[in-house]
Amino acid sequence: MTISIQVPKLPIETPEDHKAVLARIDALMDAEAGSDEAVELAVLGMLCAQYEREAFPIDPPSPIDAIRFRMEQYQCSRHSFLLLFAILRMKVKALALLRQALFGKRHGFE
């Protein structure tokens, strides 16, 4: 089985190369599964994803931003979040007291 692939300049090194690869990917989006075009699409997709990871890195969010994002996702008000946090803190303290009662020593859960 011979696969003929029409590829733009590879590897993708410049924004112009990236733009050309994206245009080719767009042209291949209706490729039949198992066809040469589908294989080309898969290869170009992987190469494009690798280039984008390197060219456009995304820093992880700060802990505060991550908490705010999660609160927004769950439509949680600040008051609700603080209430939940207080309940969890009480549970952690209760576990620490239980461990102290069972094992006679503290494990740093204060």
Image (cartoon, rainbow, N blue to C red):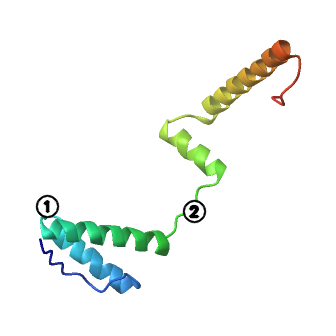
Q: In this view, does 54 lie above or below 92?
A: below
What SS does tag 1 mark?
loop
Residue pictured at 14% horizontal, 78% vertical: 4
For mark 2, does the 10 Å Cα neighbourhood hold few (<14), some (14 to 19), or many (20 or more) residues? Answer: few
Q: Where is residue 98 in the image (x, y as percent from the top left)?
A: 79, 15
Mark 2 = which residue? 59
Left-right relation of 20 to 34: right
User: Which one is in front, 64 or 101?
Assistant: 101
- Identified by mark 1, the residue type is Gly
Residue pictured at 57% horizontal, 62% vertical: 59
Mark 1 = which residue? 34
Q: Where is residue 109 in the image (x, y as percent from the top left)?
A: 81, 29
- Identified by mark 2, the residue type is Asp
**How many dots with numbers?**
2
User: Which one is in front, 92 or 2?
Assistant: 2
Q: Residue 5, located in which quarter of the rendered image?
A: bottom left
Residue pictured at 76% horizontal, 18% vertical: 94
Residue pictured at 41% horizontal, 70% vertical: 50
